[in-house]
Image (cartoon, helix red, strand yellow):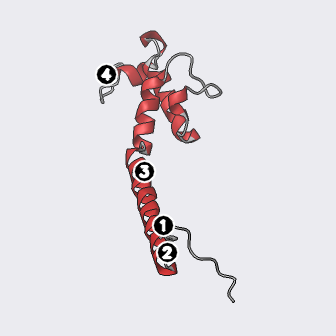
Amino acid sequence: MSNNLPPMPNTPPAPASKPAWRRRRNLITAAIVAVAALAIAGTVVWMNAKSYDEKVADCKKALDSTASRGHRPAACEGVKQGDYDALLVGWTLKHLPKSDRDVLDYYDDGSIDGSIG
């Protein structure tokens, strides 16, 4: 006498489980695809990032009369302090009134012809 019951009529057979090697293969494939997607995304972000020279050029365009050593424009974030100071001094000298400029620097043409006062 057996304790096994006969199968129910019209019952589909139980699905066979996947072998372990198929599951492992699927996980490895998914991991490779994920790593490749991350590498591609990282490359795209890196390629679209601004270079330091582009940041300096944007900073130079953003300088105005409100810029100071303590108040940087937003476009100057990421520019080194020494480079920012040089840009700020250059902007200030460029925008000085002509009457405030040094006579020697403003009128000097390479010869001493009355430009030294």
| Closest to the observer, 36 or 84 | 36
Question: Which residue is labeled 2 in the image?
Answer: 16
Q: Which mark is residue 46?
A: 3
Q: Is residue 88 above or below residue 82?
A: above
Circle 4: element type: loop
Q: Earlier in the sequence, mark 3 or mark 4?
A: 3
Nearer the observer: mark 4 or 2; the answer is 2
C-alpha gap between disc 3 and disc 4: 56 Å
The image quadrant of residue 66 is top right
Nearer the observer: mark 3 or 2; the answer is 2
Circle 3: element type: helix
Give the residue at the far front of this rendering.
Answer: 1
How far from the left and from the top, in percent, is residue 13? 49, 71
Question: Which residue is labeled 4 in the image?
Answer: 113
Question: What residue sits 69% from the left and 89% below the top?
Answer: 1
Q: Is residue 32 above or below residue 81?
A: below
Circles 4 and 2: CB atoms closer than 8 Å:
no
Q: Which amino acid is tagged 3?
A: Trp
Residue neighbourhood size for the residue with mark 3, other residues' Cα within 10 Å, grouped as few (<14), some (14–19), many (≥20): few
Residue neighbourhood size for the residue with mark 1, other residues' Cα within 10 Å, grouped as few (<14), some (14–19), many (≥20): few
Question: What residue sits 46% from the left and 76% below the top?
Answer: 22
Question: Which residue is labeled 1 in the image?
Answer: 12
How far from the left and from the top, in percent, is residue 37? 42, 57
C-alpha gap between disc 1 and disc 4: 110 Å
Nearer the observer: mark 1 or 4; the answer is 1
Circles 1 and 4: CB atoms closer than 8 Å:
no
Q: Earlier in the sequence, mark 3 or mark 2?
A: 2
Q: Which amino acid is tagged 2?
A: Ala
The image quadrant of residue 72 is top right
Q: Which amino acid is tagged 4?
A: Asp
Q: Earlier in the sequence, mark 4 or mark 2?
A: 2
